Amino acid sequence: MPVATVPPVPHYTPAPPTAETLEWADLEIIDLSQASTPEGLAELALRVRDVMRSVGFMYVVNHGLTKAQTDRIFDIGNVLFTQVSEKERMDHAAKIQEEGSKIGYKPRQLWTIDNGVRDQHEQYALHRSICGQQKHPKALEPFLPELRSFSEHNHYNVLFPVLRLLALGMELPEETFVHLHEFHAVGDSHARFIKYHPRTAEEEIKTNGVWLKGHTDQGTVTILYSQPVSALQILSPEGKWRWVKHMDNALVVNVGDAMEMLSGGFYKGTIHRVVQPPADQRGFTRLGAYYFALPDDDVKLVPFKESLALQRVGIVRKCDDAIAPSMGEYRRARVMAYGLKATTKKGDAIEEQDINGIVLKHYN
C-alpha cells in the first residue's frame, strides 16, 4: 500500500523542562480511554465533576494523538512565526477591536499589561473549519489538511467527550452541552498558536513578572497541549498561585465563563495567569498549541435549571436570566475590552470591567 507523505517542516525545539523546585498544582489525571465503557464513563463523570467544582484544571491523557503527532503540530504552528513576514502576518490580522474576533493574527504589544508595559506575545487563531472562514499565509497552505484534522480531532475526540462528562456530572442528558457546540454552526471555537517572547528586565519589574493577568476564559472548555516552558499558574482553592507542571503529550483542560453561566455556577471558570518562567528557562520562547471551545453564537448563557444536581446545590448567576447575553454577544464584548479598555482597581490585587452588565475580574 502507498504510504501517505506529509510536507517537510522545520522542527521547533522547545526549552528543556525546568529543574527548579516550584510549588506545583496537584492536578487530577483523566484517562479519556476509560470513557469507552459505560462503567468507565460513569466513574470519569464523577471525577471530572469533582475536579471542575474544586481545582478547575485537569490533565487529560490518551486523547488520541501520539507524541510524534503532537510534536508535528507544534512544528506547524511555529511556521507562522518563523516563515512568514510581519507584513504578511498583518495581512491576516484578527479584527479584535473592530469586530471582537480573535480569528487571525494578533501582533505583540497590542494589550496593556501593567504600568504602561504591553504584552510580548503573538498569536494566530484558526477558525475550526480552517479554510471555510478565513484565508491563511502562503507558508501555512501545505499544512492546512493536517490543521483541519487537528481541529476536528480536538472538537470531536476531546471536546465532545469532556462535554459529555460535564453534562453527566450535572445529571443532565449526555449530549446536553454537545448540542451547543455544532462544528458547522455560527460560532468561534478555534485552534490557536501562541508564542511568548522574553521581556526586558525593566518590563519584568514594572509588571511584577506577570505576562498575562489572572483571568477566566470566556468559553466553555479550553484545551492546552502541555509544553515544557513553565509559566502557567492557577489560583488554587486555598488562594495561592500554583505552577502547572509539564506532562509529556498530555492536555491541560479547564472550563471558562460560558460553562459557569450554563451550569448556573455548578462549574466555576478557573482563574489562571501567565508569568515569567523560572530562571533556567528565561531567554527561550514559549510556543503553545490550544483549542478554545465556545458555544454557538446564538446560545443564550442561562443555567440548565432542569439539572437535578444544580437544584440540590442552588443556582449562582453572573447576571439575571432576562439580560443574559448570547455567546456571540459576550464573546465580542470581552474580546473588544481585554487589554484595550480601562479597568477599575478593587484593592491591590483585583481589577474589574463591566461587560454588558457582567463584572469581569482581572487578578494581578
Image (cartoon, grey):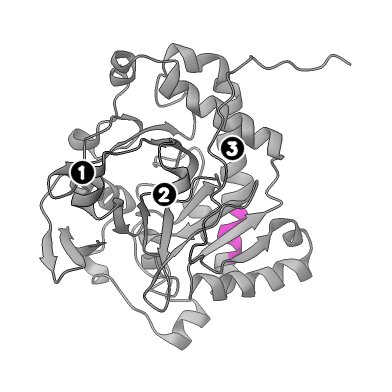
Q: In this view, does 128 lie above or below 363?
A: above
Q: Name the residue under label 2.
A: 277
147 relative position to 357: left or right: right
Q: Mark 1 points at which residue?
A: 202
- In front: 229, or 316? 229
Farthest bottom residue in view = 312
Residue 149: image x %, image y %?
61, 31
Q: Earlier in the sequence, mark 3 or mark 2?
A: 3
Residue 348: image x %, image y %?
16, 69
Q: Which is more foreground, mark 3 or mark 1?
A: 1
Residue 293 visible within the image: no
Real-space CA distance between mark 3 and mark 1, rounded to the nearest whole angstrom: 42 Å
Q: Mark 3 points at which residue?
A: 152
Span highlighted in magenta in the image: 160-165
Q: Residue at x 72, y 40 (%)?
A: 66
Q: Which residue is drawn at 31% across and 17% down?
A: 86
Q: Which is more foreground, mark 2 or mark 1?
A: 1
Total labels: the figure holds 3
Residue 250: image x %, image y %?
63, 50
Question: The residue tagged with tag 1: helix, strand or loop?
Answer: helix
Quarter where residue 335 is shown: top left
Q: Which of marks 3 and 1 is nearer the N terminus?
A: 3
Q: Is residue 151 above or below residue 318?
A: above
| Figure quadrant of the N terminus | top right
